[in-house]
Image (tube, rainbow, N blue to C red):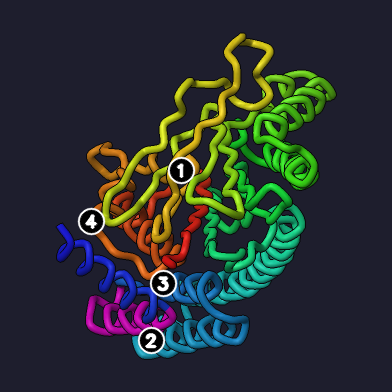
Amino acid sequence: MTAPSTGRTTIRRWFLRHLQLLPVVVLAVGALVDYYTSPHFSGEAFYTAAPMTAAALLSLRATILAGVSACVIDFALLTHFGFIGDSGGRSELAAVATVSAFAVVVNRLMYYSKVRLEAARRISLAVQRAILPELPASIGPLRLAVRYRAAVKDAQIGGDLYSAQDTPYGVRCLVGDVRGKGMEAVKVVDVAMGVFREAAEEESTLVGIAARLERALRRDRERRAGPERTEGFVTGVLVEIPHRGDELRLVNRGHPAPLLLHAGQVRSAEPSEPSLPLGMADLGTSQVRTDTLPFPPGATLLLYTDGLTEARNRAGVFYDPRAGMAARDFAGPDALLDTLLAEVRRHAGGRLTDDMALLAVTRDSV
């Protein structure tokens, strides 16, 4: 399975690298077909396709050059076959010249669209940096790494969230997934992140942080009108790694269970009792529980959103990160996340349809 996929990738890269030559190829093919076929067969389709192709792929100068070349070649061959004085020949040349001029307009429109897209991407990146923090590479004996991939092409932020910060109670982390997409989901991310940053410093327990998030998300949802009131809940995992000791604490609110990797063995940190997502506690009566798990030196904790485990291949099989982690030795959390991202892209054939946030924490060996 790997060899055909690699071959297709190589061909695709070669094609994209030489795509700028396509207008030249189109013109050359058109000229040869026009010259070596019947005088009554016209290569007009090739002469109009070349400048339009250049408009989509190349610069303004290249588009103008392609249009001028198409007109020159068409004029030369019409003259060669004696059709330049006919109304049909003049109409053909006029059509090629018109399409060439229109190609210049299309090229400019695409350029300005690209400029606007780049501006939107810069704004999106600024929003991401304002909402989602840049995590330190290490906090005490802990090494941290994070990766974020938005499902929407060219977007920098979506409905997933992550955070990690050093507090008087230990290193506290949050990874979550907002129900919904687009800017409404980003608004909820903003609310959740702001509350977590404050509560992580002030609340003595993870349950207290979860309660603060719960109240904030419910207030935010109640302020919304119409269909938006159904949005606003978040599945999430809260983690606390004390400064001393070899254990960690977890509160899971309806989120995929974290994975613990130690000595090549992978363990799923399933909650002792399921809980509703943040923002939905009023729909149930279950008590939020904190689970304590061993976290010895050399162990790595992986927090992730369901964009990782719901990535499917062509056969509809979901990606299993445990298979990518088991019986393997990683140099650190960055190496782990890079490996998982490469594998899930390969598994899904590059078709990632959901946002994805990955946070890995490794306790250094003593």
Q: Quadrant of the C terminus?
A: bottom left
Coordinates of residue 296 in the picture (x, y in percent)? 42, 53
Which residue is disc 1 drawn over?
307
N-terminal of the pair, mark 3 or mark 1, is: 3
- Residue at 52 percent across and 27 percent down: it is 254
| The magenta segment | 20-40
Taking 362 as reference, is 161 above or below it? above
N-terminal of the pair, mark 4 or mark 3, is: 3
N-terminal of the pair, mark 2 or mark 4, is: 2
Q: CA distance from mark 4 to mark 1?
A: 23 Å
Q: Is residue 363 left or right of residue 125?
A: left
Q: Is residue 115 left or right of residue 253?
A: right
Coordinates of residue 255 in the picture (x, y in percent)? 51, 32
Q: Is residue 94 visible?
A: no
Which residue is disc 2 drawn over?
77
N-terminal of the pair, mark 2 or mark 3, is: 3
Q: What kind of secondary structure does the magenta stretch mostly adopt?
A: helix
